[in-house]
Image (spheres, rainbow, N blue to C red):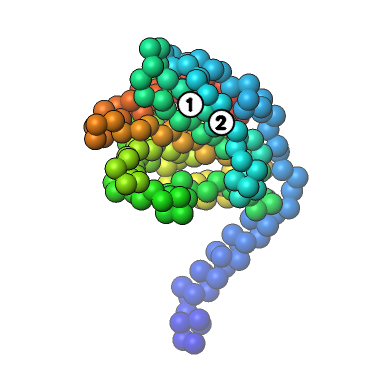
């Protein structure tokens, strides 16, 4: 009880109350919904990568995702080689409860287990600083994949789920927007060469990024 009467507790309570008022005022205003081209119009060719298969999202998966638009494709370089999966889930708003699911949370239920986790720094065109994305290696029996993913909002690249939530609140207050996208790249590991699969994933992201920046809203 003495703590509740202290100056610190009173200041903290005032800050929390002000934060609640500001957030309520922000989310009670009409939201700005960006106009975005459908993801099925996304380019089939970027850099040396060409689409080889468009994979429909199953209705039961879409029901869980609750994304406004999705893309799920396989791309490969000329002459064949490893096929790399590109998945994008775009959300026009997060005010009504829908939001990106972390790819890590979906793995155990599908039988894949993460065996390495961390971050990867990728220099990309037209940005002064490289992007920082999540990178993890997963295994299912003898099979392995390298997965690279991030959250993208208004040209902001975010690896951390917690930072994504912070910027959701900040953008809702400043811009009355809560749109975001989850971008995920999966590269199969061949001959247990995790470093080679990672290098392929980095090349894919570098080739992809200019087209992706034009597709998603600023």
**Label 2 element class:** loop
Q: Which residue is drawn at 38% across and 12% down?
A: 79
Q: Which of 16 and 132 is in front in this view?
A: 132
Against 150, residue 11 (above or below) is: below
Give the x, y percent position of residue 206. 39, 22
The label on residue 74 is 1
Marks 1,2: beta carbons within 8 A: yes
Residue 55: assigned label: 2
Q: Which residue is drawn at 71% across and 38% down?
A: 32
Q: Residues within 10 Å of mark 1 (few under 14, many from 20)?
A: many
Q: Residue 154 carries which label?
A: none
Q: Measure the alpha-carbon separation of dots 1 and 2.
A: 8 Å
Q: Is residue 124 above or below residue 67?
A: above
User: In the figure, residue 20 lies in which quadrant?
Assistant: bottom right
Regarding residue 123, the answer to whether it shows in the image is no
Q: Residue 183: image x %, image y %?
A: 49, 35
Q: Does residue 110 appear in this view?
A: yes
**Residue toward you, 47 or 74:** 74
Asked if residue 208 lies left or right of residue 36, the reply is left
In the shown orientation, is residue 62 left or right of residue 209? right
In the rendered structure, the answer to whether residue 42 lies left or right of residue 204 reads right
Residue at screen point 75% across, 45% down: 30
Q: Quadrant of residue 198?
A: top left
Q: Residue furthest right?
A: 30
Q: How many marks?
A: 2
Question: Can you tell which quarter of the image residue 68 is in?
Answer: top right
Q: Is residue 138 left or right of residue 104?
A: left
| Image location of residue 84, percent across then percent down | 42, 27
Label 1, secondary structure: give it.
Answer: strand
């Amino acid at each position: 009880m003495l703590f509740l009467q202290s100056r610190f507790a009173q200041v903290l309570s005032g800050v929390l109350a002000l934060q609640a008022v500001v957030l309520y005022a922000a989310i009670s205003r009409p939201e700005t919904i960006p106009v975005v081209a459908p993801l099925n119009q996304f380019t089939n060719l970027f850099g040396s990568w060409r689409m080889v298969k468009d994979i429909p999202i199953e209705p039961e998966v879409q029901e869980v995702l609750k994304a406004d638009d999705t893309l799920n494709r396989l791309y490969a370089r000329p002459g064949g080689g490893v096929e790399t999966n590109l998945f994008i889930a775009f959300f026009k708003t997060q005010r009504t409860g829908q939001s990106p699911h972390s790819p890590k949370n979906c793995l155990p239920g599908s039988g894949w287990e993460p065996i390495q986790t961390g971050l990867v720094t990728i220099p990309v065109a037209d940005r002064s600083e490289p992007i920082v994305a999540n990178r993890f290696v997963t295994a299912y029996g003898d099979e392995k994949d390298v997965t690279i993913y991030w959250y993208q909002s208004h040209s902001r690249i975010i690896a951390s789920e917690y930072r994504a939530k912070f910027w959701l609140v900040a953008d809702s207050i400043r811009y009355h927007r809560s749109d975001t996208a989850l971008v995920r790249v999966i590269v199969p590991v061949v001959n247990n060469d995790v470093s080679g699969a990672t290098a392929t994933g980095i090349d894919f992201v570098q080739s992809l990024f200019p087209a992706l920046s034009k597709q998603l809203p600023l």
